[in-house]
Amino acid sequence: MFGKYRIAFTWQLLIPHSGEISCLGLDTNLRDLEVQGYTVVNGVLTNDQIEKAKNAILRRVTKKTGRSIDPKSASADDFRGMEYQPYLIFDDPVFPEILLEPKTLALVTYLLGESCVLSSMGSHFRGPGGMPLPLHADGGVPGMNEVSQVANCNYALTEYSEESGALIMVPGSHRMNRQPSMSENWRSNKRSLAEVTAQISDPEELATLDWQAPKGGVTLNLEPGDAVIWHGNTWHGGWRRDVPGLRLNLAAYFCRPHMATQELRGDDRYPEVFARYADRPRFARLLGKHVFNGWREEGPDMNGSRATPRGLFD
């Protein structure tokens, strides 16, 4: 008679942060992460957050390129294929706000632990043409195992569909503990991705090719405000965009604290941002405020250390 309760109790004991995940209604998402290697959380961003994030990213694009881009009508002459704008966390107050979004942060914490660090926060924007994003895993370090070393949270700021350049995921691939091979990647007219890129360099010709998705790949059709979180070993890629306009996202990439981050951490140029979140200590931890990366020439702080008969560092 106690069978189902014993299972539920055991689940709560074995899964870190399970109480928070259950309170947030994320039990199904946690199972998806375990079984599929990724999960979709619908509607985590408000319309106001979506618009603020889009506007901030487009301001950055205009500043970098000197051009004002209409995301609804942009052509391949504006942006062809995938481009990236990094280091957005301090560009606008909306980005720290999104970083601390409870549901997505709880799932990232489940994968990487409380001590995880924001490695980067940027925006991938995909214009028409180009090629599909090759299938790959983010955790591509030697000795991959089932323990995730990195995790990705991708917020859709525009609609995701096959024709608009949506993400594609291979369920269960996080258990493979390796990168996909070329034979498991995109193909065009029976040619592998490597063969196509070796034979064709003309962007106009590449834009006319038909592509077959990797075997087992699932296209993620998302609405603005949806988020997808995935294990660092999960194979994923993206369709080429075949319609005018831009597919915009906000990509928050996390890693364990012993790993080098993609963006500079320990950045002290924005004290007002840290002051704004003084009552949210998790923000400073995510920005690497307490990550130890070695001492300078003055050596370690010995205050409070206890010497041993053989010395401090035996």
Image (tube, rainbow, N blue to C red):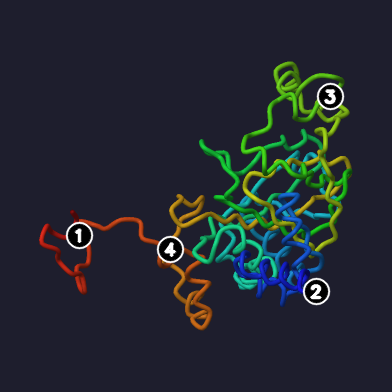
CA distance separating discs 2 and 4: 56 Å
Q: Nearer the viewer, mark 2 or mark 3?
A: 2
Locate residue 306: give its quadrant: bottom left
Which residue is disc 3 drawn over? 188
CA distance separating discs 2 and 1: 61 Å
In the rendered structure, the answer to whether residue 206 lies left or right of residue 176 reads right
Q: Secondary structure at mark 2?
A: loop
Which residue is disc 2 drawn over? 1
Q: Secondary structure at mark 1?
A: loop
Amino acid type at circle 3 is Ser
CA distance separating discs 3 and 4: 45 Å
Q: Earlier in the sequence, mark 3 or mark 1?
A: 3
Amino acid type at circle 2 is Met
Camera-side residue: 115 or 45? 115
Q: Earlier in the sequence, mark 4 or mark 1?
A: 4
Which residue is disc 1 drawn over? 299
- Vertical comparison of 245 with 103: above or below: above
Amino acid type at circle 4 is Asp
- Vertical comparison of 13 with 122: above or below: below
* Residue 58 screen position, x and y as percent: 70, 58
Q: Earlier in the sequence, mark 2 or mark 3?
A: 2
Q: Secondary structure at mark 4?
A: loop
Tell me whether the residue at label 3 lies in contact with that at label 4, contact meaning CB atoms closer than 8 angstroms.
no
Q: Nearer the viewer, mark 2 or mark 1?
A: 2
Q: Earlier in the sequence, mark 2 or mark 4?
A: 2
